[in-house]
Amino acid sequence: MIVMKFGGTSVADCAAITRTISIVQSKLGQKPVVVVSALSKVTDLLYRIADQASVRNRLETAELLEQLRSRHIGLAHDLMSENPSYCHKACSSVNEICDNLDTFVSAVCALGELSDRSKAVIISTGEYLSSNIICCAMNARGIKTGFMDARKMIVTDKEYLKGEPDTAAIQAKVPAAVSAAYEGNDAVITQGFVSVTADGEPTVLGRGGSDYSASLIGMAIDAAAIEIWTDVDGVRTADPRKVENTKCIERISFEEAAEMAHFGAKVLHPLTIEPAVNKNIPIYVLNSMNPAGKGTVILQNSLIDDGVKSVSFKENILVINIFSTKMINTSGFLKKVFEIFSINKVSVDLISTSEANISVTVDSSQKIDKVVEQLSGFADVFVDSDKSQISVIGKNIINLKGLLQKTFTPLADCKIYMISQGASYVNLSFVVDRSDLTDAVRQIHKYLFENESSN
Ligand code: ADP
Ligand code: ASP
Ligand code: MG
């Protein structure tokens, strides 16, 4: 069996879904488990609906809900114009899901209060809409496809908007759900992103979480491969939206891919790699608009050459600077500081210390108010929000002659605030002013990947 995950742009409209279905059709011999995201931009729309409902803006929510319904009904008609019975089935599912959402959103509007649990219900609707329509469209094209509800198998804790998967429960539930759905069928389909607590409460895996769903399912069924179908030719040497002349990386290691994703490369959800590593399942990153392309394969470390693979970045990070004279010559200070991060579930990316100062970077999506408040009890704390983080990633980069020179030479005019080389030798990261980011990333990329004579 293989898992095939199709992201938002691969299921954006009739043309994209038609392409996606033919890709699945070409792999029926490998028994695909298809995992789909919401149509492109639909999750953003659902976030807006949730936000407007929480401030009781009925007019705006009604208009947005109508946009949601009409886009999906229109899509069902476009996809199944020649097959009225499947078109009718898909439209009934869309109407039922949208009716339920309307009722739910009205209740939120009436209360003017939105819990994380309710938000999880709203934002996961996109995946239910897309998976129902695509399931009908596959059946309408003669691919007998079984439907699976991710909320019957992807179990997490109660962190409603970024659930932590319960791997044991997932491993116990997924294989049985997949074989039941496969009975009499050529393929099965389910929702990415969507999950549930052990008590049946709705959760989601966090933004971009469909990749993570795919690898969790792959792990649970011992898949031969996990395929992440997206809108670019594989994992590239940098984000092609920011940098010109990027190259497709043919092979990278699990470790390199995890570092890239964790340090900003949006092509994969940061946690996608972990479940695959444990079972040594290759992950392919492929382009649904160019299915003949080779894409990138992510494999175990021993099969990968040393060398720089990519430059990733996080555009918007927070640098927390902690000053205290009590730090000098005392033991236990670091413990006290990092306990506060841990208790408040704020994860730290980079750390640098000097005698009376600790600086750490954290992703700007995290809530740090309580951390700052608690640290301020015993230290002076300053938060800098105008910074970006750049990471040069590759296996054993420590062995590369002149890496630091190559990385920093093009940055001669740019202030560099923190530098950290991970002990795993896979990652060299540093912090720059946000205003310098684009230029810095382009210059480093040029120097490392486009200037062959300097490598
Ligand atoms: P999907 O909707 O298929 O999940 P995403 O938008 O989440 O797609 O991820 C694909 C995007 O990731 C690409 O369009 C690209 O702009 C971005 N990206 C960032 N860094 C990289 C990289 N190193 N290689 C490839 N794509 C990258
Ligand atoms: N639809 C979700 C999002 O936009 C999950 C995903 O696309 O992976 O974040
Ligand atoms: Mg994605």
Image: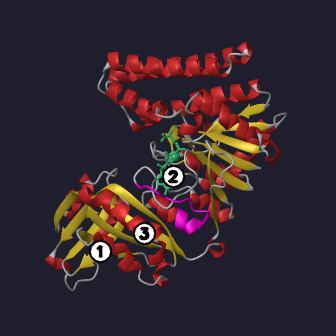
**Would residue 253 be counted in the magenta stretch?**
yes
Residue farthest along the front direction in this orientation? 453
Check disc 3 and report its element: helix, strand or loop.
strand
Check disc 2 and report its element: helix, strand or loop.
loop
Q: CB atoms at circles 1 and 2 under 8 Å apart? A: no
**Residue 324 horizontal side relative to residue 190, left or right:** left
Residue at the spot of label 3: 392
Q: Which comes before the other along the chain, label 1 or label 2?
A: 2
Label 1 crowding class (10 Å Cα cut-off): few <14, some 14-19, many 20+? some
Does residue 418 lie above or below 117 as drawn? below
Q: Which residue is more in the foreground, 431 or 326? A: 431
**Would residue 322 be counted in the magenta stretch?**
no
Q: In the rendered structure, which segment of residues is drawn in magenta?
A: 243-257
Is residue 320 among what the camera can see? yes
Q: Which residue is more in the foreground, 252 or 30? A: 252
Q: Which residue is more in the foreground, 8 or 49? A: 8
Q: Is mark 2 within 8 Å of ligand 1?
A: yes
Residue at the spot of label 1: 352
**Residue 267, labelled with which disc?**
2
